[in-house]
Amino acid sequence: MPTLILFGFVPIMKTNFLSIFAASWMTGSLALLSPAALAIQPIATPEIRAAAQSAATPRDHELVAKHYDKVAVQAQAKVKEQKELLKQYQNKSYLYGRQAQDLQSHTEALIRDYEQKVTATLREAAMHRQMASRLQEKHASSDTQRGNVVKGL
């Protein structure tokens, strides 16, 4: 059996070394591609993304903004739920044994993630309200210009 000597004192079989290397490489790659590692995106379904991209009228943008507001409220409810769970883990850590710290840190990470999602989703809603406002102003100014042209005839 071929062996590989690492640092001059640890004999390891090549196949095990390659398996360990491949597993750790895959784990690292997946961690980099995980949602937590990517930029925080608002919570959106494919349907709402399509509606947001095809929104052309102020009403369309207002509907998209209302959807994002509803999603933000749901995410805020998740934050509250996770905070209550965290309080339980902190106050009664003796019930969870060795897992107590892991549960606490995991719950804290979920809280941070949900809070970032709430912020991003509310930002997206505000952006669509701004687009609706701009379209409304543009529509109003074009109506005023048309009215001036008609009066001039």
Image (cartoon, grey):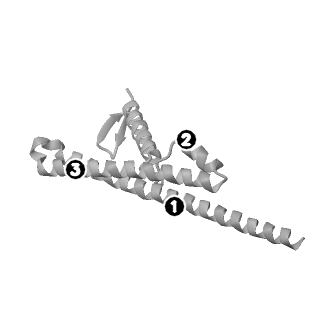
Q: Which mark is residue 126?
A: 1
The quarter of the picture where residue 135 lies is bottom right
Residue 100 at x, y percent in the picture = 17, 46
Q: Amino acid at mark 3?
A: Glu
SS class of the residue under badge 1? helix
Labels 3 & 2 near each other (Cβ < 8 A): no
Q: Is residue 9 left or right of residue 153?
A: left
Residue 16 against residue 134 in the figure, above or below: above
Q: How many C-alpha atoms fall within 10 Å of the one at disc 2: few (<14), some, or many (≥20)?
A: few
Name the residue carrying label 3: 84
* Distance Cα–Cα, label 1 vs label 2: 19 Å
Q: Amino acid under label 1?
A: Ala
Residue name at image x 66 percent, y 66 percent: 137
User: In which quadrant is the N terminus drawn?
Assistant: top left
What is the quadrant of residue 127 in the picture? bottom right
**Label 1 – label 3 distance at C-alpha:** 29 Å
Q: Amino acid at mark 2?
A: Pro
- Looking at the image, residue 143 sits to the left or right of residue 133; the answer is right
Distance from the alpha carbon under mark 3 to that under mark 2? 31 Å
Q: Which residue is mark 2?
A: 46
Whether residue 37 is visible to the viewer of this picture, yes or no, is no
